[in-house]
Image (cartoon, rainbow, N blue to C red):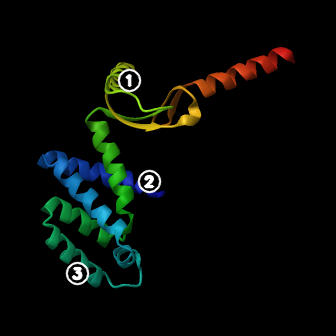
Amino acid sequence: MSGITIANRYAKALADVMTERKESNEVFAELSRFSSLIAGHSELREVFANPVLALDRKSGVLKELVTRLKLRPTTINFLQLLLNNHRLHNLDQMVRALSRELDQRANIVSAEISTAREISDAEKEMLRDKLKTITGKEVRLTFRADPGIIGGVVTRIGSLIIDGSIKNQLSQMKQRLMTQRA
């Protein structure tokens, strides 16, 4: 079974618990913070990923961390479950899967918008409204400038790419001209 499949299963189960207890935002924030902590300290990553290190020693490290961070019981139980199942070193993948699961349940879709230059807030809102109409969902946007697209907009929603860039239009025009000559 792939790591993504496993992460998705954990995410669905945890999302059920978080939703039932009405603590989705808080637990997600704590897990994100804990994941960043591990990512930022190579020693912690090594402790939790090392199969030779005894589980009780890893558990002691985890207990010390959750005590210092003052995490809620749902978060602690999930981290302990991952540790017991030798998956705590995959926490970042679990957090990404949990984010996708929570977004899906909240009818939210994430989109990445690339433009040749920085765009105004009014243009951002117009894009958000257009994508909301197209998808029928709330849209979380991230923006980035990419001068290589020359102009226009490239939108990525999951695996769907809507390429309205001038670079793409020029490429398509070139292809049409080439096939007309042949």
Vertical position of residue 86 compared to residue 151: above or below: below
Cα–Cα span, label 1 and label 2? 30 Å
Q: Which label's residue is closer to the chain start, 3 or 2?
A: 2
Q: Residues within 10 Å of mark 2 (few under 14, many from 20)?
A: few
Answer whether labels 3 and 2 touch (C-beta < 8 Å): no
Vertical position of residue 82 compared to residue 144: above or below: below
Q: Mark 2: which secondary structure?
A: helix
Instruction: Name the residue carrying label 2.
Output: 4
| Side of 56 where 151 appears, left or right | right
Q: Which label's residue is closer to the chain start, 1 or 3?
A: 3
Cα–Cα span, label 1 and label 3? 49 Å
Q: Amino acid at mark 3?
A: Gly
On the image, the x and y values in percent for residue 65 come to 21, 73
Instruction: Name the residue carrying label 3.
Output: 60
Q: Nearer the viewer, residue 114 or 129?
A: 114
Q: Amino acid at mark 2?
A: Ile
Answer whether labels 1 and 3 touch (C-beta < 8 Å): no
Instruction: Name the residue carrying label 1.
Output: 127
User: Is any part of residue 129 visible from this angle?
Assistant: yes
Residue mark closest to the camera, 1 vs 3:
1
Measuring 34% from the left and 62% from the top, which residue is drawn there? 91
Measuring 36% from the left and 71% from the top, which residue is drawn there? 86
Q: Which label's residue is closer to the chain start, 1 or 2?
A: 2
| Side of 47 where 79 appears, left or right | left
Residue 45, by quadrant, is bottom left
